[in-house]
Image (cartoon, grey):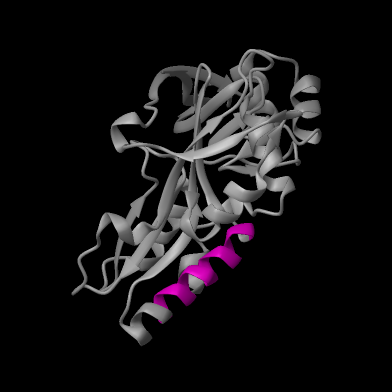
Amino acid sequence: MESLFQHFRKDEQPFIEQVTGWMIDVEDRYTPKLTDFLDPRQRFIVTSVIGSGDIQMAASGLFEDAERQRVLLYPSYYEPQKEDFQITVFDLNYPTKFVTLQHPDILGSMMSIGLDRSKFGDIRIDGQQIQIAVADEVSSYLQANFTTAAKVKVHLEEAASEESFIKVAEDWTEESHTVSSLRLDTVISSVYNISRQKASALINGGKVKVNWTVQEQPSFELNESDMVSSRGYGRVKMIEIEGRTKKDKIRLLVGRLETTK
């Protein structure tokens, strides 16, 4: 366990221990184990923890290229089926002539009825069409209780077929930056071309996530492969630390995400 911990941040250790517990479950019971929805960083940790042993891993969020997916850990004899992931995709219907719902409206309303974020996957929006992936075990509860968002009435209806699922194409562009350190505030100041003071205000205001988790420490040190998202500024992936300049600055290759539907 200690050898695993050294490859990850301290705040990720409880999740590593949880994954280890799942593995023990699968080994002891010799039956599959289905997780809640996990973000890409969590799935990377699961992959790292299970290694190349007898336990296998499969993941699905039903949507094509889903960001949030449920993971199935299973013994080598087992052959996973689509139904094993127990996910329902709903169309969210609402009076579009009165309001245009945004991602925060939907997320906030769903969590206000007592649902944990881990019980639903991607929320996809294409104009006025909205779809939500939900764990089967809470789908009936959600349908019955999720009735308003942004002060308008909403109604969930199971999506007719996979052909009707909203598809999202991601367009990443690469950029090179030179920074004095890998502090979070320093990097996003450079990448977003904003002042260090404004970068710190975004972080302190809870508007910046690192690897899908809110990070409120401006001095937080970034590493290669980290994903940074800032509300209103989009996403940045730390692709490579390319070395140092003659003046001892850090050369950084990042990816910027532009989303198109």
Quarter of the rendering containing residue 119: bottom right
Q: Position of residue 136 (x, y in %)?
A: 47, 57
Query: Which one is in front, 63 or 196?
Result: 63
Quarter of the rendering containing residue 25: bottom left
Q: Position of residue 246 (x, y in %)?
A: 53, 21
Q: Quadrant of the C terminus?
A: top left
Q: Position of residue 213 (x, y in %)?
A: 63, 45
The mark total stands at 0
Residue 53 visible somewhere in the drawing: yes
- State the residue at coordinates (36%, 85%): 29
Query: Which one is in front, 139 or 205?
Result: 139
Query: Which one is in front, 39 or 188?
Result: 39
- State the residue at coordinates (78%, 20%): 198
Residue 250 visible somewhere in the drawing: no
Compared across the picture, whether 238 is left or right of 248 comes to left
Let me know if residue 60 is in the magenta part. Answer: no
Residue 35, placed above or below residue 130: below
Residue farthest toward the bottom in the current orientation of the protein? 28
Identify the main secondary structure in magenta: helix
- State the residue at coordinates (67%, 40%): 147
Query: Which one is in front, 20 or 259?
Result: 259
Compared across the picture, whether 153 is left or right of 128 comes to right
- State the residue at coordinates (54%, 26%): 235
Compared across the picture, whether 72 is left or right of 205 comes to left
Highlighted range, magenta? 11-24
